[in-house]
Image (tube, rainbow, N blue to C red):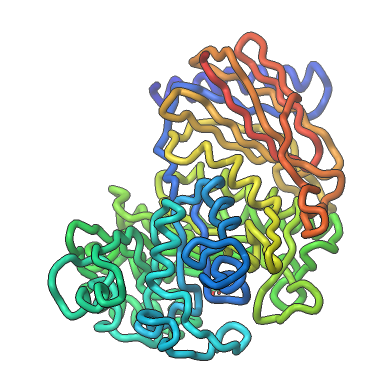
Amino acid sequence: MKKSLFLLIVFLFNMAFILNAQKENTGKFNQLVIIANNTGPVISKDIYGHFSEHLGSCIYGGIWVGKESSIPNTYGIRNDVLFALREMKIPNLRWPGGCFADTYHWKDGIGPQEKRASIINTHWGGVTEDNSFGTHEFMKLIELLDCDAYICGNVGSGSVKEMADWIEYLTSDSDSPMTRLRKENGREEPWKVKYFGIGNENWGCGGNMTADFYSDVMRQYSTYLRNFSGNRLYRVACGANNYEFEWTETLMREPVNRYMFQGLSLHYYSVPGGWGNKNSATNFTEDDWFETFRLNYEMDRIIKGHAAVMDRHDPRNTKGIVIDEWGNWFEVEPGTNPGFLYQQNTLRDAITAAIHLNIFNHHADRVKVANLAQTVNVLQAVILTKDDKMVLTPTYHVFRMFSVHQEAQLLNTDLRCEDYVMGERAIPAISASASVDKEGKIHISLANLNPSKEITVTCPVIGGTFKNVSGEVLTAPEMNAFNSFEKPEMVQPTVFKGFKYNDGTLSITMPAKSIVVLELKKE
Ligand code: AHR
C-alpha cells in the first residue's frame, strides 16, 4: 500500500477519533489504527537476544553447574534453564561480557578443566574465576539452545593476535596451529559464530579510550577478524553510551570504517533515582514506577538520535544498531554481594520489557540486534536460580509472549492515546506495536502503564478480515508483584478475554498495569 493512502486512511480515522471524543465528551479516546497490508521492515529475531557475563551467578550457578553437579544438567549446563530459554525462543546470546570481556583471555578457558588458569574477576566482586566455563562450554550452550553466538572480544587488555587466533580457533576448518589445538581439545568441526564484538564499552571499562583513538584501534582489530570456511562475521564496533551522539558521529564519518563493521553497539540502562540513589527492585512508590517508564521511553529518543547520525553517513542503511545492553538497573537485594548485581524482578520490569520491545519493533529498519542485561541472576534477569530451584521472572513471560514478532513484518500503525500523568510529568499510557508473520497472522502487543486505570483501546484493522482472535495477558494485583522461589507463580500470563471484534474493529479493554498480546487469524 502506498504511504499516501496509509496517511489518508489514518487521517480519516483520526477525524472520526476526534469527533467521537467530542461526542462522548471523554476528552481522550484511545485508538490504534492498524493497516494489515501496510508492511514495514522485517523485525530481526535478534532484537529478542540476551546477554550472559561472568558476573555474580549468571554463568556459575545460573547456567553452568558442571557435569558432576546433582542439579540435572547436560554437559554441565542446567537443564531447567536450557529448557526455559528454548521455550522463550532465545535467538542469540552475548558472552563473556560486558566489562569482563576486556579482561578475558580466551586461552585460559580451553583444555582440561583442572589445568585451566584461575584469575581474579576484577570487575565483579573480586572473586576467583576458575575458567571452567570457556569457549567449548559456551559453544555447547549455543548448540543446545539452538541460537546464534554473539562473542565479545578483548580490545582493552588483549591483543590483535589473541583476537585473530580466537576467530581462527572457532571458525576455521583449515589445518593450522589454532585448529589443531581445537581438535586436541575435542572439537573436530569448526563452529559458526554470527556476531563478534570488537571490545565492550571502550569509552569506559574497556580501556577509557577517546572515540578517535578507538576508531583507529577498532580498524586494526577488525582487519584481522577473518571470515573463515564460509562463516560470515557480523562485526560489532563498540558504540555509544546513552545520548553520546558524538561517538557515533566519529565512528560513522570515517570513510574506511565503512568496511570495518556491520553493526554499532549502543548501551542504555534505566536507573531511576540515579547511580547514587538507585531504586529497590521491589520496594518502590508509584512515583518510582512512573519514573522508570519515563526513562524507558527515552530509549526511543536515543535510538532516533543515533539513527539520524547513521542516516547521514549511511543512507543506504547498511549498518545496524546493536543495543547489546539494556534494562532496568536497581539496587542489589539486601544482603547480597554488591558486585554481583542480583535484583528481583516485578511487574514493573515486565512493562519495561514491553515498552522496549515495542520500541525496537518500531525501529526494525535500523535496530538489528538487542540484548537484555542479563539472562540469569543479574540485573533485569529473565530467570532466577537458587541451588536447584529456578523461577521465571515477569520479564521472561514478556519475552515469551512477544516472541511472535520474531522475523515477522512490522505493520505501520498509528497510536493516539491518553497520557499517564504524575504531577507535572506525562508519558503515553499505552505502548503498542503490531506485525504480520509469514502465515499472515497479525500480532498486536500492548502495555497499559497506568497502575490504577483500565483503558479501552479501539483498534480498526483495515485491509484484511479475520475469523479468530485470541490473546494472553500478564498482570498482577500489585505493582511490585514478583515470582519468588516460595511463590513462583505470582505473575503468570493467562488467557485474555477482554476484547471484542466487530466489523473489522477490535476493542481491547486492558486491565490496569497489564501487558496484552493478541493474535488475529484468517481461519
Ligand atoms: O551489565 C553489567 C555491566 O554494565 C557490563 O559489564 C558493562 O558493559 C555495563 O557497564
Give x and y (percent) for residue 481: 82, 52
Point out the quarter of the image occupied by ligand 1: bottom right
Question: Taking 1 as reference, is 270 above or below it?
Answer: below
183 sits left or right of 55 in the view = left
Question: Taking 411 as reference, is 350 above or below it?
Answer: below
415 sits left or right of 48 in the view = right
Viewer-side residue, 47 vs 421? 47
Give x and y (percent) for residue 410: 47, 35
178 sits left or right of 149 in the view = left
Quadrant in the rendering for residue 415: top right
Residue 97 visible? The answer is: yes
Q: Residue furthest top?
A: 503
At a point 38% along the width and 66% down the height, the residue shown is: 249
Give x and y (percent) for residue 155: 36, 81
Viewer-side residue, 266 vs 470? 470
At a point 47% along the width and 29% down the height, the residue shown is: 436
At a point 51% along the width and 15% down the height, the residue shown is: 522
Residue 300 visible? The answer is: no
Quadrant in the rendering for residue 393: bottom right
Viewer-side residue, 166 vs 186? 186
